[in-house]
Amino acid sequence: MDSTITITLGQLFTILFALLGIALFVVIFVLLHKLNESIKQIKQIITKNEKNIDETMERIPKVLHNVEEISGIVNEEIKHVQGVVKNIEDTVGYTASAAQGINEDILEPIRELFQVVSLVREMFPSKKKNWFKK
């Protein structure tokens, strides 16, 4: 009796592919089982929060309407603010030119007058009073 078993290369590949197929089947089964558990948990969460979800879905149109109103109001207020900023800009420009005018029309002549007075003082030396001389 000859107890040798001959396995061809084709049979070896068939066995390997069969084992890989079984392993792949097990992996797919485990993944499907975990996916099923996850879906059950999601279903429980949705069922538990169904009331809150319904309330939120009912509020969404109101919220969107409020957002539209607020956006319109903000746009109009921005237009008003832009007008106010323009007025302030004009007022600041007017004030700056008025200050420049005051400087040129009033302060410069006063400064020149003080310079003239200073020159006149220098021309006439002042006598110091000697009250404390012995």
Image: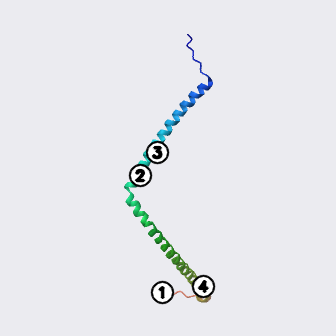
> Which secondary structure, mark 2?
helix
**Discs 1, 4 touching: Cβ within 8 Å:** no
Q: Which residue is mark 4?
A: 97
- Report the front residue among 123 and 91: 91
**Discs 4, 3 touching: Cβ within 8 Å:** no
- Report the front residue among 116 and 25: 25
Density class for disc 2 (Cα within 10 Å; few <14, some 14-19, many ≥20) is few
Q: Amino acid at mark 2?
A: Lys
Q: Amino acid at mark 4?
A: Ser
Q: Amino acid at mark 1?
A: Trp
Q: Residue at x 41, y 55 (%)?
A: 46
Cα separation, mark 2 vs mark 4, equals 73 Å
Residue sitting farthest toward the front? 1
Which-is-in-front pick, marks 1 and 4?
4
Rendered location of residue 110, percent (x, y): 58, 88
Rendered location of residue 45, percent (x, y): 40, 53
Residue 70, relative to residue 131: is it above or below? above
Q: Which residue is mark 1?
A: 131
Q: Which residue is mark 3?
A: 35
Q: Which residue is mark 2?
A: 43
> Which secondary structure, mark 1?
loop
